[in-house]
Image: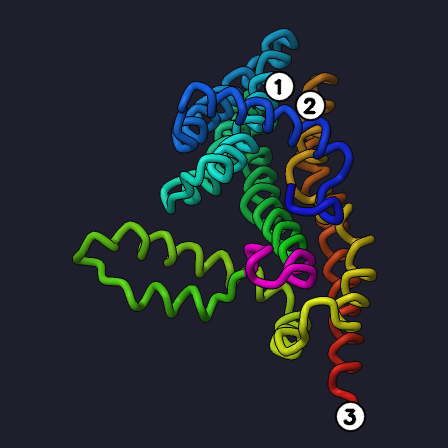
Amino acid sequence: MKSRDVESDFELYVTRTPGYLWALFFRRLHVHPIAVTLMGIVIGAASGWFFYSTDLRLNLIGMLMLIWANWYDCADGQLARMTGQKTLVGRVLDGFAGDVWFFCIYLAILLRLWPQWGIAIFLLEAWAGLYCHTRQCAIGDYYRNVHLWTMFGGEGSELDSSVQVKARMQRLRWCSGQWFEKLYLFFYARYTCGQERQTPEFQKLRPLMEGQPLGSDIRNVFRQESKPLMPLCNILTFDTRVIVLFLSLLVGLPWIYFIFEATVLEAVRYYLIHRHESLCRRCRQTLSQP
């Protein structure tokens, strides 16, 4: 676990615990974490095919497969930490997995609804998936890492700076064995820039906070006020959106999921950013005082 501050009871018992048991199972079989990631990608992508059908029994199979894939997505990271088999390829594939799953799911539902909706369902899915979904997951992940960074510093979080990522990328050469890492850093820098554009007040606060030791008053205040926002971050990531997706499939109206993503989750994103940016502004004013 990263911290109980950022992980809900639902995530702990429904995702983390089964993922941990799978990780123990794969460790006993000496399965590499990358193999687990690849199996999760295949299972999650295949689940989308079962959402194309209007047969509820097939939809239920797809739901179970997506849950199974999510357990593997949790297990591969835990297995890598257990065995010390952390690799760049594994990190790239782990971040790529969710994108593959949802692309296949969106495509299957698009083909399912096209005869009735026509171009309208394509436009709705494009807005919900390419704009809303991307920004919602990015900001939820970013604020969780900001919270962990406040508690544990750089060693206890995955909070990266686009400037540092770009500097690392520029030190690498395309015409060498470093091309894969350079390509990964190129796209990762773009992803990090997107997160930073959504959080201007935190970008102003960050250099001031970096000079504060772990456990300082300002870091403790930030943690106390940031902690109530973590459930909102969790809503924007995987669990809540998948629950709504499943419910929309159960009632035979999968378009509800895209409306939910484009309205309710977008409202949560705006509210979360407003609350967090206000917190950053207050903390920056405190640190700026003599």
Residue 72 place in picture, x, y as percent = 53, 27
Which amino acid type corresponds to the residue marked 1 in the rendered image? Met
Front position in the image: 268 or 80: 80
SS under mark 2: helix
Residue 149 seen: yes
> Which callout, 3 or 2, points to the residue nearer the camera?
3
- Distance from label 1 to label 2 (Cα)? 7 Å
Front position in the image: 79 or 283: 79
Which amino acid type corresponds to the residue marked 2 in the rendered image? Phe
SS under mark 1: helix
Q: Dividing the picture into quarters, in which one does residue 285 lie?
A: bottom right
In the displayed structure, would residue 35 be above or below residue 191? above
Residue 114 seen: no
Query: Circles 1 and 2: CB distance less than 8 Å?
Result: yes
SS under mark 3: loop
Q: Residues within 10 Å of mark 1 (few under 14, many from 20)?
A: many
Q: Dividing the picture into quarters, in which one does residue 29 lie?
A: top left
Quadrant holding the N terminus = top right
- Distance from label 3 to label 1 (Cα)? 56 Å
Residue displayed at 63% across by 7% down: 57
Magenta region: 146-159
In the displayed structure, would residue 280 be above or below residue 101? below
Is residue 241 one of those drawn in magenta? no
Q: Which residue is mark 2?
A: 246
Q: Dividing the picture into quarters, in which one does residue 168 lie?
A: bottom left
In the displayed structure, would residue 186 be above or below residue 121? below
Is residue 154 one of those drawn in magenta? yes
Residue displayed at 29% across by 68% down: 171
Q: Which residue is mark 3?
A: 290
Q: Which residue is mark 1?
A: 63
